[in-house]
Amino acid sequence: MTTVSIGGLGKRYGATVALDSLDLEIGTGVTGLLGPNGAGKTTLLRCLATALAADRGRLRILGLDPAVPAQRTELRRRIGYLPQNPGLYPQFTAYDLLDYVAVLKELTDGRQRRAEVRRVLEEVELTDRARTRVRRLSGGMRQRLGLAQALLGEPQLLILDEPTVGLDPEQRMLFRALISRLGERRTVLLSTHQTEDVGALCERVVVMNSGRVIFDGSPRELAAVADGRVWLSTTAPAGSQPYWRNADGLYRTLGDQPEGGERGQPSLEDGYLLLLGPSTRAGAAR
């Protein structure tokens, strides 16, 4: 089932093109969204979350048109959104913040609302911090609280922008377990710079650059972009080709075979860097 259908979507900020006639369809499951800074990922997510209107093109979410006010209101009842920098009122307790957001999401029955707040606190393992003020929570806890507010009301579409920022390895593992469960019965769109999260969670990955989709496939297919283009050598390669020294003491090169280089196993990150081109690879190697 298609949850999101996008056709020719465009958005500009002055002379800057953020979305350039973008076409995309997203269905049930976890889809990873990758791309460099300025690729248009956050603009796309804000359009999907109905926080921003596109300049042109067609957008349908759960069969509804966000350009129509009544349908936009209905959509907001069915969407959970975690922005990159969620605004969490520092003087509120974790419980009071979620209760406030639940009211905004029209959970007006007091008993039902309290049960829903307790449920999402438990989902993100913050039950023991329910009465702690937001300003006293660690960065990772605030990120989990942001995820909890997105989960209120069992949304059919969950939009997450850099959700693992500030999470330690154990918290990231718990996050992956939660998102994988959620993706079994709803649509989750996960934008991140963490390719390991995409490889661990997503059955589908979309790569954006300059406001367009430049890749749409499985993580395995993205890694295959680097087939025959990953090399390992015992000495640093000559020339300007980007490389780095890995934990085994070998030099890993992406691109043309260096002298003495032996073929290495490509990763999702290798495919992603090769797809984006030399300037991105050089930046990653520095």
Image (cartoon, grey):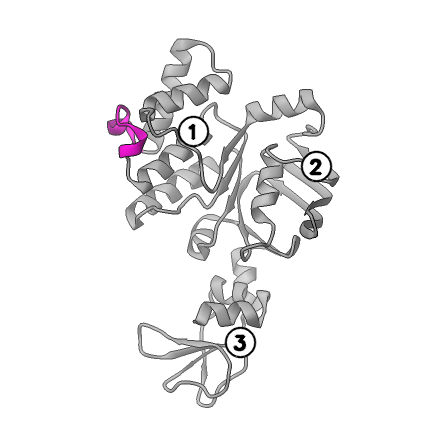
Q: At x 42% / y 56%, what residue is drawn?
A: 196
SS class, disc 1 = helix
Residue 28 coordinates in the image, percent (x, y): 57, 38
Q: At x 28% / y 39%, what residue is drawn?
A: 138
Q: Is residue 137 above or below residue 278?
A: above
Badge 2 amino acid: Leu
Q: Which residues are magenta?
A: 125-136
- In the rendered image, the quadrant that contains the N terminus is top right
Q: Earlier in the sequence, mark 1 or mark 3?
A: 1
Q: Which residue is mark 1?
A: 149
Question: Marks 2 and 3: CB-CB under 8 Å?
Answer: no
Q: Is residue 141 above or below residue 173?
A: above
Q: Earlier in the sequence, mark 2 or mark 1?
A: 2
Question: Is residue 133 located in the magenta-colored stretch of the structure?
Answer: yes
Q: Which residue is mark 2?
A: 59
What residue occupies the far front of the structure in this picture? Answer: 14
Q: Which residue is mark 3?
A: 229
Front-lying residue, 135 or 173 = 135
Question: Is residue 4 located in the magenta-colored stretch of the structure?
Answer: no
Q: Is residue 190 above or below residue 112?
A: below
